[in-house]
Amino acid sequence: MSKGGRLATSLVLFLVAVGLVVWGVAGLLTPGTPGGEMNFTHAQAPGQPVNLTVQTVGAIGFGSHPTWVSYLTKDPASGHWIQDNTWVLPAHTVIDMTVYQYDSGSPLRNQEWGQVQGTIGGSATINGANYSVYNSNSGNGVGHTFSVPELGLSVPLIGVSANAQVCGAGPCHTSSPHNVIKFSFKTPGPGNYHWQCFVPCGLGYLFGNGGPMSTENYMGGFLDVVHAS
């Protein structure tokens, strides 16, 4: 093969490799549509903790309400971020939860929601640092909470700086400013348990409680706890 032919072949192979990398990254960041329930009962060996990863975004960026604030869930099988906030979880099992919090925060109307409640150890971590209570009148405030009232579980999700170049639309990439919040809790017996955010963030709605705050798969969902297999 001539030198020119070898160069052409190398260029084609390089472009194919770049295309595969771009396709792979785009696949992970391309949002999926709600599928009813996301099943985490087969994501680990029986009796082992379940890893559940979500992100909170200031604007979902797609669907019928692209400007609404939302949670997205990472599909344990595909790695895609899905707008599906009903999770099938095994009963009496430790859930290790990771939240990528991309939204900015504000002072809480009720400081009770600044307390970490119901987690294993009574605390959570933000970017590796332990916390059990957060004063939302200082720092960056609280963007959202992850709260399951029936379980006495609630974790304030501390916001990123309002001066930061926050992610414009979900799903967000870790190159955007964010906080990584981790905590663990244990599921109870089988049942259906509602979870939600208690920070009124439905902009444009009375007292901030409409829109995404009152629509499933945005700022709330369900823990569908079933017998462990």
Image (tube, grey):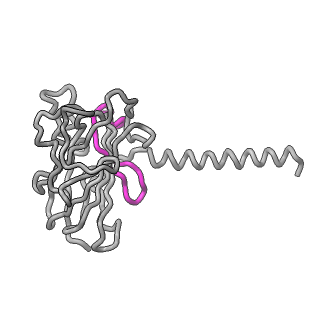
Instruction: Classify the position of the C terminus by image quarter.
Output: bottom left
Residue 194 visible in the picture: no
Q: Across the whole image, how many numbered discs are drawn on residues?
A: 0
Q: Is residue 167 magenta?
A: no
What is the quadrant of residue 164 in the picture?
Answer: top left
| Residue 166: image location, x then y, percent | 37, 32
Which is the main secondary structure of the residues drawn in magenta? Answer: loop
Residue 180 visible in the picture: yes
Q: Which residue extends farthest right?
A: 2
- Magenta span of residues: 60-82
| Residue 129: image location, x then y, percent | 30, 49
- Which residue is found at the position 38% from the left and 48% from the top? 81
Q: Is residue 214 above or below residue 95?
A: above
| Residue 121: image location, x then y, percent | 20, 59
- Which residue is found at the position 43% from the left and 43% from the top? 174
Q: Is residue 79 above or below residue 229?
A: above
Using the image as rendered, state which of residue 92 and residue 193 is in the foreground: 92
Using the image as rendered, state which of residue 45 and residue 135 is in the foreground: 135
Name the side, left or right, on which 4 lies relative to 143: right
- Which residue is found at the position 40% from the left and 40% from the top? 172
Name the side, left or right, on which 79 lies relative to 114: right
What is the quadrant of residue 142 in the picture?
Answer: top left
Q: Is residue 71 magenta?
A: yes
| Residue 76: image location, x then y, percent | 37, 59
Q: Is residue 33 above or below residue 140?
A: below
